[in-house]
Image: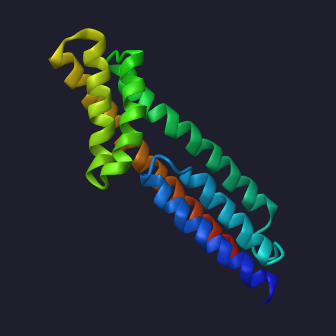
Amino acid sequence: MDLSFILYLLAVIFVLIGIAGIVLPALPGIPLVFVGLVLAAWADGFVHVGWPTLLILGVLTALSLLVDVLATVVGAKRVGASRKALWGTFIGSIVGLFFMPIGLFAGPLLGALLGEYWHTRELGRSTKVGLATWLGILLGLALKLALVIAMLGLFAFAWFL
């Protein structure tokens, strides 16, 4: 079996798992997409996609990691979320994986709400923090999706140029 076939196959697997990882919080989505794109470039001997393009894709990957962390934290911090609310968001995201697909969205919201309620004992404030955290996660999801589309578009443009 040809090595390039194996590399292309691995590239497709990494990209598909990476795209799933945009929604699934347990998977590092965009870094997996980046690994897949590097494998595809390597399979071709870097003829169509060279290091300058891969460097740009690497910067976009690093940017995605920043977006991932900041979107949730900024959403929560804007409304004064406590550290317990942030931990609740994290734990709720993990627990939500076991209750797919609703748990993906309800887990972080409920986790932040419960964490903030544990901290303040104020239901109205806790609800506000939960919703703000959840909106931050949705904003991060949209930004990561846009980054993956840009990465795939840049890769395709470099490949066919």
Q: How many labels does the image show?
A: 0
Residue at x 53%, y 51% (from the top left corner): 27
Query: What sort of colour scheme is used for the picture?
Result: rainbow
Q: Residue 99 at x, y = what percent?
A: 30, 50
Residue 8 visible at all: yes
Query: Where, by quadrant of the figure, is residue 111 drawn?
Result: top left
Residue at x 78%, y 78% (from the top left corner): 44
Left or right of 140? Residue 114 is left
Residue 161 visible at all: no
Q: Residue 8 at x, y = what percent?
A: 69, 78
Q: In which quarter of the image is the N terminus?
A: bottom right
Q: Which residue lies furthest to the bottom in this view?
A: 1
Q: Which of 9 and 69 is in front in this view?
A: 9
- Compared with 42, 56 (above or below) is above
Q: Which of 40 and 161 is in front in this view?
A: 40
Q: Quadrant of the C terminus?
A: bottom right
Query: Where, by quadrant of the figure, is residue 54 drawn?
Result: bottom right
Left or right of 52? Residue 116 is left
Residue at x 57%, y 53% (from the top left corner): 30
Query: Where, by quadrant of the figure, is residue 43 drawn?
Result: bottom right
- Compared with 119, 62 (above or below) is below
Left or right of 34? Residue 103 is left
Q: Residue furthest left?
A: 124
Q: Which residue lies furthest to the top in this view?
A: 120
Residue at x 67%, y 56% (from the top left corner): 57
Q: Residue 97 at x, y = what percent?
A: 38, 49
